[in-house]
Image (tube, helix red, strand yellow):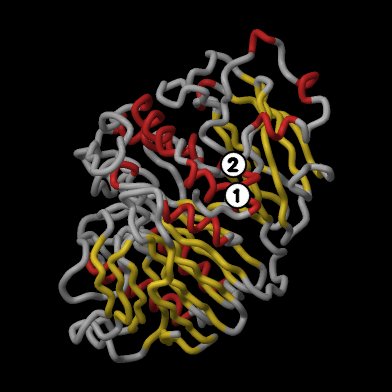
Amino acid sequence: MHPVTRRAALTLAGAGALTALVPGTASAARPSADRFGDPFGLGVASGDPGPDGVVLWTRLAPEPGDPDGGMPPRQVDVGWEVADDERFTRVVQNGTALADPRDAHSVHVELTGLAPGREYFYRFRAGGHISPVARTRTAPAAGAAVSALTIGVASCANFGSGYFNAYRGLAADEPELVLHLGDYFYENEGSGVRDPGGSEPKDLDGYRIRHAHQRTDPDLQAAHAVAPWVVVWDDHELVNDWAGGDGEVSASRRKAAFRAYWEHMPLRRRSIPRGTELQLYRRIGWGSLATFHMLDTRQYRTSGGSITGDRQEDWLIDGFRDSRAGWDVLGQQVFFAPRSGGGKSQSWDDHPESRERVMQGWVDAGVRNAVVLTGDEHVHHANDLPLDPDDPTGDIVGTELVTTSVTSGGDGEDDSGDGGDENPHIRFRADRRGYLLATFTPAELRADFRTVDTVKSEDSGVSTAGSFAVADREPGLQEI
């Protein structure tokens, strides 16, 4: 038996167990012509919280292995409810959305009118079925004082490489917000532990099937159900190592991957793809405590030039100038700190002028505390950020926290340490699978690098490989 929290147990309860909690469920069902198998096998999710609302997501797919999810080729009514409590005795909003076959019967409900800084619970109904219950929350009001925020940070979840024990651990830790920094799934066919979900996707049907296969995992569903997510992509959501206008990736494949990504993520309408473009860079404010600047370092990068593109870079630096937050946090994909030897390619080291402009931008703007959160690397890292990359012991002006992978790379090696003499600003590294927990308060940032024992079986413990703190206005990591 896996240890689960009370909330996770309720979240993963079957629709039959929840029916008794919903008066009038049978009378609310659509006519028998629209009946189908349980459509909520991909779970539910929420994302992009604001002070007055959040996005609620689900996709109707009684047969996840089919491109159409086993749904009829017509629109289907999907009821939704939001309540103050898990048993829905105090429903605060409800309504009906249309699940359209052109969107793979996905539903994105953009709520407004909720109270800021509050916890809520939500669920869906369709075809006589009721979804699992999940928790979400709104962001605090702009400028509101916030005593603390704990976030989970994850990336690189290759289904074939192992079990999602990291997601189960993340759900049990119950963060208030989750940032996913890319490689939500892998398009390749490699399989070391589990079936990756069929052949490599190259068209819309293929990407829909691969997303749905990923979403059937109960530990991933539990992690989505515990808190709202803020997502950005890296490369494997399309194809390994794609970047910018990569001529080796056809426009039709880009369109298919981008469309399927939006269909399966709790994103707002502003992120609906337009041809071969999908805007993911955006800001999530958390009162006076933090601002999360979510970046896309794939879509706009140029070879040897900018990793963000000029427009996104200007947007980011303008955000630094306007910020009044205690912590300005960049959520992005690839290793940011300078590094001599080792590590993966296609990092900010390949775009040093971009990195210099971004760092100088937050220094010139007087950002109170700058933090970079990073995925992709498959290894935990805690890095001080020197303003001069050629002088790693010089002025430290920020912090980088790199989360390891959920499964990619297998179990890893039992080696923890730092960056050695060549990289004294790399204060910690651990080659194990897991996730990052980060707690922000007005006084400090605490980072706990969480690791799992194994991804080769479902029975795995979770422990903390290292913990660090950064004091307010005192850049530089301190080991706890």
Residue at left 46%, top 38%? Answer: 215
Residue at left 42%, top 56%? Answer: 166
Farthest residue, direction left: 341
Residue at left 28%, top 71%? Answer: 353
Q: Position of residue 260 (x, y in %)?
A: 43, 34
Q: In this rendering, is residue 327 above or below 184?
A: below
At label 2, the amino acid type is Leu
Callout 2: SS: loop
In this view, the residue in front, 339 or 413, is 413
Corner quadrant of residue 19: top right
Q: Position of residue 322 (x, y in %)?
A: 57, 71
Q: In this rendering, is residue 40 above or below 405?
A: above
Corner quadrant of residue 119: bottom right
Callout 1: SS: helix
The reply to whether discs 1 and 2 touch (Cβ–Cβ < 8 Å) is: yes
Identify the mark at residue 253; answer none if there is no mark: none
| For residue 234, side relative to residue 281 (left or right) | left
In this view, the residue in front, 397 or 71, is 71
Identify the mark at residue 8; answer none if there is no mark: 1
* Residue beneath disc 2: 12
- The alpha-carbon separation of the residues under discs 1 and 2 comes to 6 Å
In this view, the residue in front, 114 or 362, is 114
